[in-house]
Image (tube, rainbow, N blue to C red):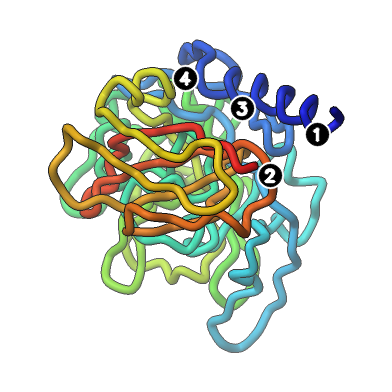
């Protein structure tokens, strides 16, 4: 009886998570830890107005060589500026690129963002800058940084006006030697788009209006992230998009996946109700016998683009 009640409760929570109406401008509550993120519509995209602050804090140690103080250990980790956890509430976490991307490399991937949100691509950043009234000058520089900064951030020619609502704060960063720099002087944001062995990032400076697009930051560098909302995140809409079927469901062993009206290569991801990736497969037959009893969500993703093709709730007995 107790197990039945728990499953009913989890089902109710899951239904609310995937079916409730979210309007950009609402406050996003990350059910994984209760963190609250105001949101803002800039152009056609919905962005967080605060830096991501999810994960367990780990200390950064300075060294004479490039290094990581984060581990690929299924525990999401973040740095606090200068190893001072009191800075997290104001400035959010700083993340190495691989940790932020949850050790995947697909542009636009969810990474460690809340379910229904993702790490923005280089192209999404460029689109957002233009929609906010800025100008990105090829190849690396641009103007309009003040429009993205919170009022009270920056000084002189770099004083923030926040006409976009993006509300950036100069959160500083952690370099690949493990040393922190730039609090109140600069803010640097990761994108999910790689540039060779590095990744693209965007910098706002306190003393000027410029926006710098850089592509040479080592992935061990600790930078901020603003998640952006997926174009669609309702389970009902995804269920209608393609005829995705899973059977048997419920089950205690294997599931078989069939999409009768879709032709193309797919990858499959199984997540828990908090959005944590538990299984990744490219086979349409997946064993879930090692998962604890409960409710999970199966995502069918286009093998090349990572586009979400279908989504189904599955129950493990």
The answer to whether residue 186 shows anywhere in this view is no
- Whole-angstrom CA distance, mark 2 to mark 4, is 38 Å
Q: Quadrant of residue 147?
A: top left
Task: Kindly identify which residue carries mark 2.
Answer: 293
Most distant residue in the bottom direction: 64
Classed neighbour count for the residue bearing mark 4: other residues with Cα under 10 Å, few (<14), some (14–19), many (≥20): many
Q: Which circle marks residue 3 in the picture?
A: 1
Q: What residue do we see at 43% from left, 71% from top? A: 218
State the image coordinates of residue 66 (x, y, percent, origin top left).
Answer: 53, 82
Task: Kindly identify which residue carries mark 3.
Answer: 37
* Callout 4 secondary element: strand
First reached walking from the N terminus: tag 1 or tag 4: 1
Task: Kindly identify which residue carries mark 4.
Answer: 40
Please determine whether, in this image, residue 48 is positioned above or below residue 174: above
Total marks placed: 4
First reached walking from the N terminus: tag 1 or tag 3: 1
132 or 56, nearer to the observer: 56
Q: What residue do we see at 25% from left, 33% from top? A: 127
First reached walking from the N terminus: tag 2 or tag 3: 3
Q: Quadrant of the N terminus?
A: top right
Q: Quadrant of the C terminus?
A: top right
Q: Quadrant of residue 59?
A: bottom right
Please determine whether, in this image, residue 259 is positioned above or below residue 41: below
- Whole-angstrom CA distance, mark 2 to mark 1, is 9 Å
Classed neighbour count for the residue bearing mark 2: other residues with Cα under 10 Å, few (<14), some (14–19), many (≥20): some
- Whole-angstrom CA distance, mark 1 to mark 4, is 40 Å
Classed neighbour count for the residue bearing mark 3: other residues with Cα under 10 Å, few (<14), some (14–19), many (≥20): many
* Callout 3 secondary element: strand
Q: What residue do we see at 35% from left, 62% from top? A: 199
């Amino acid at each position: 009886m107790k197990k039945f009640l728990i499953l009913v409760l989890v089902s109710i929570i899951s239904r609310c998570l995937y079916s409730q109406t979210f309007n950009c401008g609402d406050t996003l509550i990350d059910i994984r830890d209760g963190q609250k993120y105001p949101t803002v519509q800039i152009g056609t995209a919905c962005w967080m107005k605060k830096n991501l602050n999810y994960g367990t804090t780990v200390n950064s140690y300075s060294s004479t060589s490039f290094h990581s103080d984060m581990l690929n250990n299924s525990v999401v980790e973040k740095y606090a500026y200068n190893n001072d956890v009191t800075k997290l509430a104001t400035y959010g976490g700083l993340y190495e690129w691989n940790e932020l991307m949850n050790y995947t490399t697909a542009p636009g991937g969810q990474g460690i963002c809340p379910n229904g949100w993702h790490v923005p691509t280089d192209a999404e950043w460029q689109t957002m800058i233009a929609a906010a009234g800025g100008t990105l000058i090829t190849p690396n520089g641009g103007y309009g940084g003040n429009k993205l900064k919170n009022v009270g951030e920056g000084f002189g020619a770099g004083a923030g006006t926040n006409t976009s609502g993006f509300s950036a704060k100069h959160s500083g960063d952690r370099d690949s030697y493990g040393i922190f720099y730039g609090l109140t002087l600069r803010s640097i944001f990761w994108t999910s788009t790689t540039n060779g062995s590095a990744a693209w990032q965007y910098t706002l400076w306190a003393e000027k209006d410029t926006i710098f697009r850089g592509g040479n930051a080592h992935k061990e560098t600790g930078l901020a992230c603003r998640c952006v909302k997926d174009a669609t995140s309702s389970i009902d809409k995804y269920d209608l998009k393609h005829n995705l079927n899973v059977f048997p469901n419920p089950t205690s062993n294997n599931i078989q996946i069939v999409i009768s009206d879709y032709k193309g290569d797919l990858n499959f991801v199984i997540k828990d109700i908090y959005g944590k990736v538990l299984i990744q497969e490219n086979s349409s037959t997946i064993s879930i016998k090692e998962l604890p009893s409960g409710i999970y969500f199966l995502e069918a993703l286009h093998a090349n683009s990572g586009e979400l093709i279908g989504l189904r709730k599955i129950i493990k007995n």
